[in-house]
Image (cartoon, grey):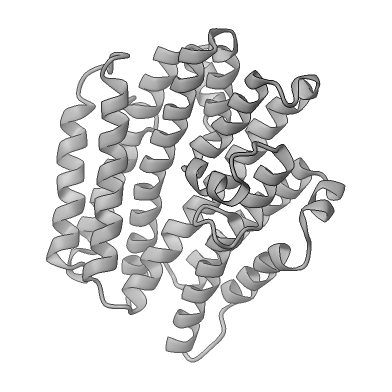
Amino acid sequence: MLGKTAGGLFWMFRYLERTENTARMLDAGLRIALTRSAAAESEWKSIITATGLRKEYEERHGSFTGPKIIDFLLRDKQNPGSTMAAVVNARNNARLVRTALTRELWEAVNESYMVLKDVLAHPITDRELPGVLQTIRQHAAIVRGTLAGTMLRNDIYDFARIGTFFERADNTARTLDVKYYILLPSVRHVGSPADNVQWEAILRSVSSVRAYQSVHHGDTDPRSIAEFLILDRRSPRSLAFCYDKIVSNLGYLSKANAAASASMEQANTLNAMFQERDIDAIFTQGLHEFTQCFLRESFRLGQQIEQDYRFTE
């Protein structure tokens, strides 16, 4: 496979995963803003921080208000990290690798672009927002389902899956780090209804409320939430689950190329972070320190994958 094709697939699915992640974070922020107005500014600030776009936002808007952040993250043409920018980039990458995709997958991506371009053509009102976020999530699910249902399990599929889980792990780590860090000063409120709503917001941001509740029987415990989102391999949004899949798909690529790549070695090293320690060891190290270490090493892995598979060639 040409390096540009591999890179196009990797980034196409990173961008598609990003649209859904942003929608879920905004949905969680909206619920907090509607139920606890006193915490609204802090919640919106945490969302923009988790996306890694806080500096860009502050330079242009300053104050952290719901309408400004929603517009910035969903449809701002000057924000390269907005949902609309991600949809455009996903479609452009899909066009680049058109011959590698099934007809059904191309049509799903193209329809997603056309629908969201129309939906995000004007500022989103409070009444419209839940429906818009649901539309974004639905189209991400359709594309993901079409990939699973129509594509051969070959190197094309491997790069698509690596892009998906790479972006998902990055989002889970950033969300957990930012929200946990913000909630930590409120330890005096642990166990209160307000505290439980905030911790549930972490799970809602990564689409894991029902999954967590089914395992922990509805108990919203900060330590258990961190363990679930980092180490629980049953959860499709956990870091451990994502890196199991990344290692698996990189392994298929290494076998196909009859050589173990440097990125495979780095992925195995990262995966060992979730196999060789429990949640107590992570908390002893410091959750913030652990997630920051993970994000640095994950960034390095992304660069190594690009180099090993020659995305620019």
Picture quadrant of residue 127: top left
Residue lying farthest to the right in this orientation: 284
Question: Is 170 or 282 nearer to us in this picture?
Answer: 282
Left or right? Give the position of 261 relative to 129: right
Where 152 sits versus 189, above or below?
below
Percent position (x, y) of residue 309?
45, 72
Where 195 sits versus 139, above or below?
above
Percent position (x, y) of residue 270?
67, 65
Q: Residue at x 23, y 27 (%)?
A: 120
Residue lying farthest to the bottom in this orientation: 258
Left or right? Give the position of 47 relative to 22: right
Quarter of the image containing the C terminus?
bottom left
Residue lying farthest to the front in this orientation: 217
Question: Is 195 or 33 nearer to us in this picture?
Answer: 195
Q: Residue at x 48, y 65 (%)?
A: 306
Percent position (x, y) of residue 5?
31, 68
Left or right? Give the position of 2 relative to 64: left
Quarter of the image containing the N terminus?
bottom left
Q: Residue at x 53, y 49 (%)?
A: 214
Left or right? Give the position of 72 relative to 271: left
